[in-house]
Each structure stands twice: as C-alpha cells, then as structure tokens.
Amino acid sequence: MESETPLLDELEKGRWPSFVKEIKRAAKKNKAAHDLLRIEELSYKDKITHWKHGGIVGVTGYGGGVIGRYCDQPEKYPEVAMFHTLRVNQPAGWFYKTDTLRKICDIWEKYGSGMTNFHGSTGDIILLGTKTENLQPCFDALTEAGFDLGGSGSALRTITGCVGPARCEWANIDTLDIMYDLTMEFQDEIHRPRWPYKFKIKISGCPNDCVAAIARADFTIIGTWRDSIRIDQDAVREYVSHGFDIESVVRRCPTEAISWDDKNKVLNFVAEDCTRCMHCINKMPKALRPGVERGATILVGGKAPIIKGAYLSWVIVPFMKVESPYTEIKDLLRKIWDWWDENGRTRERLAELIERLGFKQFLKDIGLPPVPQMVYKPRSNPYVFLRR
Amino acid sequence: MARTDIGPPNYKDMLPDIIKRNYGKWKYHEILRPGVLRHVAENGEALYSVRVGSPRLVSIDFIRDICDIADKYCNGYLRFTSRYNIEFLTDKKENVDLIINEVQKLGLPVGGTGTCVTNIVHTQGWIHCHSAATDASGLVKAIMDELYDYFVNMSLPAYVRIAVACCINMCGAVHCSDLAIVGVHTKPPKIDHEKVVAQCEIPTTIQACPTGAIRRHPDPNIKSVVVREDLCMYCANCYTVCPAMPLADPEGDGVAIYAGGKVSNARKPPMFSRMIVPYLPNNPPRWPEVVDVIKRVVEVYAKNARKYERMGEWIERIGWEKFFKLTDIPFTEHHIDDFTHAVETFRTTTQFKW
C-alpha cells in the first residue's frame, strides 16, 4: 500500500531519533495524532503552515495556560479541527519520579492526542492537541495529580532555572527553591494575564547560565560570589602532572587574574582582578571552585527581537544575598511590574520601555542607586536631562 | 470543582535520595566519556548521569519507555535538561552500561556532554504554530542526522549550541546561539479587508508595526489598513494582533542562519548571533541547503578554532571578513544592519583584514 506521508517518511531514516516515528506511534492509538501526521505532511507538500490563529479557550478561573489552535481545513482533517495545547508547569529543575510522569501519560492518553513536548521552550511540559470539551476535565485530572498550568499571553510566564544545587557544584544560589517559591508566590500573575505583554523570570546558578537567562528573561537572576575563588593547589598540581595544559587555561583568563608559577608549581590568583567569568573553574573543576560569599547578580531586559530588536539583560543589582523567603527579590519584582504596568504600551517589553523612558528614570522610580557596574562605560554625549 | 493555583509539584518530592542527601554539597564533576557524568559530593558519594538525546516531540509511549528504564536502574527517578536531553541518574556505577544498553535498544543516542554539538533547542513549526515560516522538528532532525557524530563525541574546540526558531518571534530565543536557524517571511502581509473589519482592532494593528508601515485605508468607507511595502521587513507583528494579515507564503518563506552567539559569561561576555545567510528556501523534508551551511560552518570552526574558543570568540579573533572567506559564504547588502541598533555594527577603525 502506498504511504500517505511519503515526505515525512524520509524523516524516519537517519541516526537521530525521529519525531515522525513518535507521531506514528501515537497515531496507532489516537485519531487526532493520525490527522496531525497527515496535516504535517500537507505542510511539507505545500510549504506553509495549516494552523490558524488561536481562539479564546481555557479552563475556569484562568486567563492562560491553554493555547487555542484550529486547523484551516477542518473538513479534511476533522480530528485536528480543534487541536489546543496545555502548558503544564514543570517541577523545578525538570526532575521527575516516574510514577508522576506515568500519571501525566495516562491523563493525556484519556484526554488528548498522546503527543507531547518534553519540554517547551519556556520550560513547561507541553501537552499537544485536544478538543475544547476535553480542556476542563483534563485540567481537573492534572490538578488531581498535583500539576497546574503554566503561563501564556500577557502574563508572568512559567519560571525556569537550571539544575542548581541538586546536581551542580557551581550553584551559588538555590535555583530550584527560588523557582518554586516565586512560582507559588505569583500564581495569580502566572494564571491571569493583565500586563502590557509577557514577563519572563529565569534563574541560573552561575555565570555559565545554562538556561540562557541573560538572553531570554525580562528578570534575570544569576548566581555569583563576592570573595575569591577557592583553589586546591594540590589538585592543580595533580592536573599538571597528568599532562594538563594549564597555560592554555591561564592564557584565556580575560583579566589576567591567574598565572602559573611553573617553578614552584603554584597557581597565583589576584582576587580583585577576577570578574568571576567561570572560565578557569570550568576547565579545572576538581581544583577550582566559586567562593563562599555567595549570592546573585540581578539583571533586567533580556528578550528576543520582536519588536524593537533583541536585548541582553543588563545589571541592576551587582550583588544581592539570596535567601528564603526571597523578600528582596519579590519586592523588587512587584515594584518593576507596577512601573511597567503603569507606563508600558501594549506589547512593550520591559527593555523597550526602559529604553523609551531612560534607564536613569527606571532606577529613580524603582529606587536603585546608580553604580558603575551597571554600564560598560559612561555616556560620551553632553545631552543630560538634569531635571527629568 | 477543580482546585486552582496549586502550582507545580514540589521539586523536593522529585529528587532521588542521593541528591537529597547531597543537595548543595557537590564538590566536583568529571565527564567519564561522552554522555556520562560523574558528580562527587563532599562526603565522597558519587552520582552517575547518563545523558541521552531526544526528539522532544514525543509520544506518551516514549515517556513510558524511558520511565521503564528509570524504574529498572534509577529507583524511578530521571530528569530532563534545558536542551531536552534525558538524564538517567544512578548512584550505582555498574548500572551505567546497563542503562546505555537499554537506551541504545530504543535507538537513542548517548552524548551531549562537553565539547560537543548538543541537542537543538527549537520551537513548534508546522506541527502547531500559526505564524511558522518553516518547520522546526524537521530541520532539527535533518541537521542532527548530519551532526550525529558531534553529539556522541567530544571532538570540538568548545561546545556548540544550535537553536531553531520557526519565525522571528523566536519562542526559542535563539538569538544568542553558536548557530541559529530562523524561519523568515519575505513577502508583505496579504490583507483580507473583509476579515480586518470583523477580526482586527485598527489602532492596535497600526501601532503594532515597528517601522510605521501600516496606515488606515485611504478610502474611509473601507474599515481596514494598507501596508507601505517599502517599509515592511516581514516581522509579522501585525499578523500577531490581526489574523487578517497573514505573511506566510510557500515561495517566499524560508530560513536565515546566524552564528557566533553565546550566553555563558566564560571569557567574553554573552553575545548575539549575527546573520551569516539572509535567506535559503524551504526545501522539506530535509532542507539540504540549510544542512550544508550548518555542517560546513561547524567543520570550518572545528578545524580552525583554538582550544576552548567558542564559535563567536573564534570569529571575533579572526574577523568576520575572514569567517566569510573560510566558510565560502557570500557577504551581501542584507548582512549590513539597517534596523534599530545598526550604527554600532559599522566598522569605525582602519583595522581589518583582506
């Protein structure tokens, strides 16, 4: 028999695991998954998407968490005429017990297409495709199993962070606990969109920033330390005696804060020259570690290009102690949201608003003192608004 | 009545005992071989993680398969990484090979650690998105089939992060990746005036345009808008607020490729990815033109970069003019920025190479 998906079948070949195989697997049990496969094939043939703009669908009491989706050819693909997605808030650090995961699978077998994303770009579990009438019962079953929806639309999006102290020696802050605590504190902000646009919070335990918080979050928390890195000189010598090319590490220190004394076999380090970039620590994890006076740098403004261009987050608090119950961070967030909500235009992210009204104005209104760590360099022009 | 605002499960209930015991007390880690990490705690306990590639778009039976492995060898615990890899966690060294064996039976690659090409962060594409200019899962599959050896080995000067976004909304925030593939439209919106009346708020639509290209329709009897095509750069922000202005077009849509971004602060500060190819056509199911550029750039980087140099650091050292020469990618007028922060990219020095 001739295949109904000759183009997609090509993507069953090759060494990397195939999403087409996965859809076919789901399609054996589920009609919507079968129509998903067929309409994806149609897109491969037509070179265009066959999904329409979302309609307003959801669950009682929430303004988000569900992405409404309809296909443009419901008569030919009736099983995906409605194909809505639920964003399910992941446990911090994406750790799971298998019995919990199996519960999600069973719920989705009953109410949805059987297709998922582990995980979506923001970090949620994505349950991909169901009908309007299934949304509420599916949500009820999810909450029964201990899960809740994540954010969508002009709301606080699901908070994401790195693996942190659960399995990383470089975690300067408890990323999982901060994630969980802030998520619980701001349930209303996550579930009921009310702002000019989306707002993202991401948390990385060290300046390696494994969750790209600096590029992707309006509010970026990155773990760091204030004192000196810790050096185990014996372990350094151990590296060197095994043929490790220490000079190639030293040479790339961006501030020349480390040097190797080959005669005395000692790694010299000038703490005040170090900018805590992680380079040397990354290369010699057995010998070098972050310091002990730990906390976080807070940055704001990161976002993708739409609308005024992409921004990387920039520093607003060079160093903050970060301890439960995280009151300082929560207060700062609330102040920023009030300011943004008060001044922001529709679809204006925080970075764009700060650029429009001025970083100086932002600092004044939020009540943060200007410090040189906030900029690469001072202004070069003389056009200073003295009284704004 | 459903409960609301209960939040996600508490992470503490999802952690294996060895992690509970050593939470915040890890001392160092090492990569035993591609895909296998060993984390050692202050008290000497060791945790082994086996990292496994996933297509991300998976069926519930796939999840059940990996749960079976975790039940058998990991006391019923597993985790996912920020780049969709699965990690099997065990405190028993002898389980590592057994896990790898089971994983390989499922056809899944073990790797994604150290100086590798790890899994590609990506968006939904034609699978689920109304604004997609390309498919994401298909591009990822086609690219990773070619770069598979870089996933299961650690042969590069530094790690290479690749990301795919199916339109310039960039849900995957790909703009700081070593290599980024972005779906682009190249034709202005096609306006359905009758639908605009029914579905769109005209002031919001006009305000949505970052270049001011959208105006009210000159005929006051037509409650719609017009687009000055010379001002349109196909961002589709108007389509997001007004469904009657689709930009998707089978011939016009395709992908652009960017290079040299990073988010890590190691050595150089985080950097944006920069355009290396403004447009390649959508050519499903395997996008050979795109795969060719990606593979070529990775290979040229692997050959030329110095140890520890990320793609962007390498390019900055040799200069972009040299990058285009080495990779044999043509430099065009489209590579020169003419949007909001353009001037800071112009070369204000006499220093350059030939």
Image (cartoon, grey):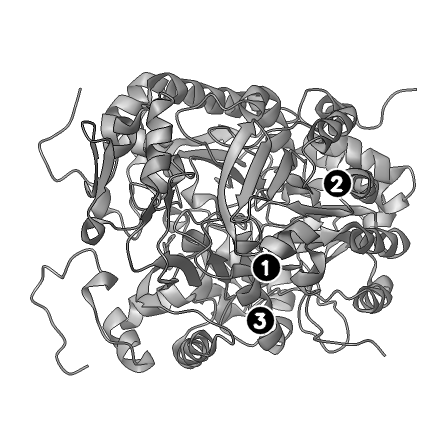
Graded by Cα atoms within 10 Å as few (under 14), some (14 to 19) or many (20 or more), the crowding at tag 2 reads many
Q: Is residue A380 left or right of residue A4?
A: left
Along the line of sight, which residue is nearer the eye, B48 or A7?
B48
Pinpoint residue A186: horizontal percent, then vertical percent: 58, 75
Residue B193 image label: 1
> Residues under labels 2 and 1: Cα distance?
40 Å
Q: State the SS at label 1.
A: helix
Q: Is residue B129 above or below residue B249?
A: below
Q: What amino acid is at disc 2?
A: Val
Is residue A340 something one can see in this rendering? yes
Which mark lies nearer to you, 3 or 1? 3
Q: What amino acid is at disc 1?
A: His
Residue that label 2 marks: B58
Pinpoint residue B108: horizontal percent, then vertical percent: 71, 28
> Residues under labels 3 and 1: Cα distance?
48 Å
The chain that hosts pointer 1 is B
Question: Do the numbered discs 2 and 3 sit on residues whose CB atoms are within 8 Å?
Answer: no
The chain that hosts pointer 3 is A
User: Which quarter of the figure has residue B49?
Assistant: top right
Q: Residue at x 59, y 30 (%)?
A: B35
Q: Residue at x 35, y 20 (%)?
A: A243
Along the line of sight, which residue is nearer the eye, A385 or A117?
A117
Q: What amino acid is at disc 3?
A: Asp
Which mark lies nearer to you, 2 or 3? 3
Q: Are marks 3 and 1 on the same chain?
A: no
Image quadrant where one finds the C terminus of chain B:
top left
Q: Are marks 2 and 1 on the same chain?
A: yes
